Image: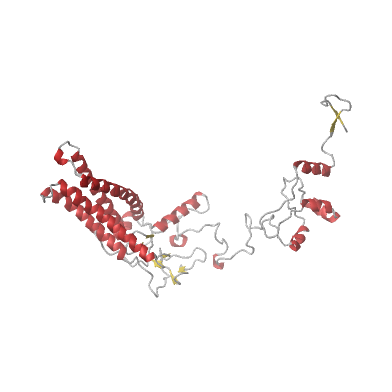
Amino acid sequence: MAGILGQLVVNFVLLLICFIAYSSQIFVIWPWYGRAISVELITLLLPFNALVGMLLWNYFLCVVTSPGSVPENWKPDTHEDGFEVKKLTGGPRHCRMCERPKPPRTHHCRQCGRCVLRMDHHCPWINNCVGHFNHGHFIRFLFYVDLACSYHLVMVSRRVFTSLGGRYWDEPDTVELVFIILNFVTCIPVLLSVGAFSLYHFNALMNNTTTIEGWEKDKAATMVRRGKIQEVKFPYNIGRRRNIESILGGNPWLWCWPTTAPGTGLKYPITESDDTNTNAMGNWPPRDPDSVHEGDPGRGFALPESPWTYENGSVNPNLQPSNSARRRKQEGTGASTLPPYHPDYQPEDEYESDIEDGDDEYTDNSRVRVRRGSEGYEIRPAAREDMLARYLTEIGGKRYHYYVPEPGSESGDSLTHQP
């Protein structure tokens, strides 16, 4: 079903491109020039059709060109620089889905069901992944969409401004007016959406960053801002000129012409190390200290002994078992189950002395009852007056003096001190 849906999306994109490109020429520009071939008409439409041809050519290459996959028997050369390692173990990256080693900048695509070399993202509009071997075609496709749509808007807008001159022979007929409106309705949203998308990808091109690596850089910047890690230099930013050449080729005159992507996609040049980053590949992507094991890297990842942890890794002291036998066993540990601000709270030493004296009344009142098979606690309901009365009874009146109305007082407002 996904394959059929992807083909439908590709056909829809082709129909949209052809509608914007050719309906404007047939139903708007051709009647405007009197349905006759002229030098002015050729001068106007020849650059536009060249841009549309390059747009369709690069779109075709984006759809049919494989982004690149990992060879069958490929293994990383751990003795050379430029190979990525796992965050936890420090060993070469391995794909659990494909059960193969993963070259640098390679990621597994669930839609395609394979590992893609230098994966940028999976684009539904081309029904393909954008990877090492078709990334240049994708950049050129965005570039020509921006140029063609801009040229189209200028061309149709010029026709509209000409009809506003007041000459009756320049006024568009009904069919021409309908297609002018349809061209504006379809072309403007395409230019705005693809234009914003192009700005992002052109910036990523100059920084030699894929969409996935952009997310990793944002995550690393967040950890640096929160003080979790020190600043780590992105290893693949080798200079603006070399960054563009790694995607579009080494000849600047052919950057706008469809060419084969340079390299094999299995290894990429990295920036030179400096004082702040002595091992770029070993530190990228940086790991979050709060989400990984911080012990000896040689030990690898190890799960904690208890799945229930609290704050700094200790067991939650308020976590009580629902089993009655285990709960009774824990009651003799001397730890109060109530928070310090509760009226019935007692320090640990007083709690232990009450247990040793066998004060069953206090034990019954302070026990937190846990409903079996549920989350949280079931507290015995008590009113504020009962809690205050119990508290005053426990302290024995040592800190408070009681005042009663004076006998025989009419208003009851005058109070006497009762020792």
Instruction: Please tell me how many numbered marks the rendered image carries.
Output: 0
Where is residue 174 drawn, in percent x and y?
21, 45
Quadrant of residue 309 in the image?
bottom right
Residue drawn at the location 30% of the way across and 62% of the way down: 62
Residue drawn at the location 46% of the way across and 62% of the way down: 282
Residue drawn at the location 16% of the way across and 46% of the way down: 32
- In the picture, measured across the screen, residue 405 lies left or right of residue 114, that is right
Quadrant (top left, top right, bottom left, bottom right) of the N terminus:
bottom left
Closer to us: 299 or 360: 360
Quadrant of residue 267 in the image?
bottom left
Where is residue 395 drawn, in percent x and y?
82, 43
Where is residue 31 drawn, in percent x and y?
16, 48
Closer to us: 366 or 304: 366
Q: Is residue 131 visible?
A: no
- In the picture, measured across the screen, residue 321 lies left or right of residue 91, that is right
Quadrant (top left, top right, bottom left, bottom right) of the C terminus:
top right
Image vertical order of residue 263 relative to residue 399, above or below: below
Where is residue 286 drawn, in percent x and y?
48, 58
Image vertical order of residue 403 relative to residue 111, above or below: above
Image vertical order of residue 343 relative to residue 70, above or below: above
Q: How is the image coloured?
A: secondary structure
- In the picture, measured across the screen, residue 162 lies left or right of residue 391, that is left
The extreme bottom residue here reads 73
Closer to us: 46 or 284: 46
The extreme top residue here reads 410
Q: Is residue 338 visible?
A: yes
The extreme front residue here reads 174
